[in-house]
Image: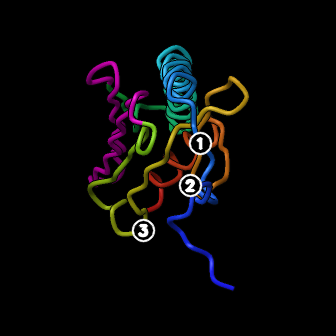
Amino acid sequence: MSISRGAAGAVNVGKPIEDPPRKNTENYEKRKLLEEQGPLLWDRLRAQMTKLCSALNAEYGKEVVTTQMESAGEMDARLSVAGAVSKLSVTFDAVSPSCALKWFYSGPATRTSPDRRCRIYVHNGTVGFQANATPYTPEVFAKQMFEGLLSE
């Protein structure tokens, strides 16, 4: 017995029929959450990075790591030790879910630290970072970025 794909009732077999107004509402709510909660993730990441840099400077007894906020969604950290300068550049865009957080290195840290990026997602009304299908806190990413800067 063969199945005719053109038969009445066989249309959209295997695909749920979506209600366009409901889908538009869900997309709106998701974007609204990203715009509201995304900057808070960025603030937590920047605060943790500043804390890690301050701790290293205190350990050295002088300023070896400096941070600079280029704009609302950009941050740079520079490590100067023994004449070598490594730089970490981080960008954040809350409304770009697939690539919200990006960071890369220049200088000696480039040899051992890969450039990375991660997405931002909404789950049960909460926004978070995710890489390789694993959720991460901003503090964990800040630590990874900082360790990459130190890995010469």
Choose mark 3 or mark 1, whichever is in front.
1
Quarter of the image where one finds residue 122: top right
Of tags 3 and 2, the one toward the viewer is 2
Tell me whether the residue at label 1 lies in contact with that at label 2, contact meaning CB atoms closer than 8 angstroms. Answer: yes
Q: Residue at x 57, y 37 (%)?
A: 18
| Dot 3 and dot 1 residues touching (CB under 8 Å) | no
Q: Is residue 38 visible?
A: no
Residue 62 against residue 71 in the figure, above or below: below
Q: Amino acid at mark 2?
A: Asn
From mark 3 to mark 2, how far is it between C-alphas?
50 Å
Q: Which residues are magenta?
A: 69-96
CA–CA distance between discs 1 and 2?
A: 7 Å
User: Of the residues shown, which amino acid type is indicated by label 3?
Assistant: Thr
Mark closer to the chain start, 1 or 2: 2
Q: Residues within 10 Å of mark 1 (few under 14, many from 20)?
A: few
Question: Under tag 3, what secondary structure?
Answer: loop
Whole-percent x, y for residue 28 in the image: 49, 19
The image position of residue 127, as x and y in percent, is 61, 28
Q: Residue furthest right?
A: 124
Residue at position x 38%, y 57% in the image: 115
| Rendering quarter of residue 48 | top right
- Please check the rendered image and state whether residue 68 is part of the magenta-colored stretch, yes or no: no
Q: Position of residue 44 (x, y in %)?
A: 57, 24
Which residue in the structure is indicated by mark 3?
112
Identity, as a three-letter code, of the amino acid under mark 1: Ile
Q: Which residue is mark 1?
A: 17
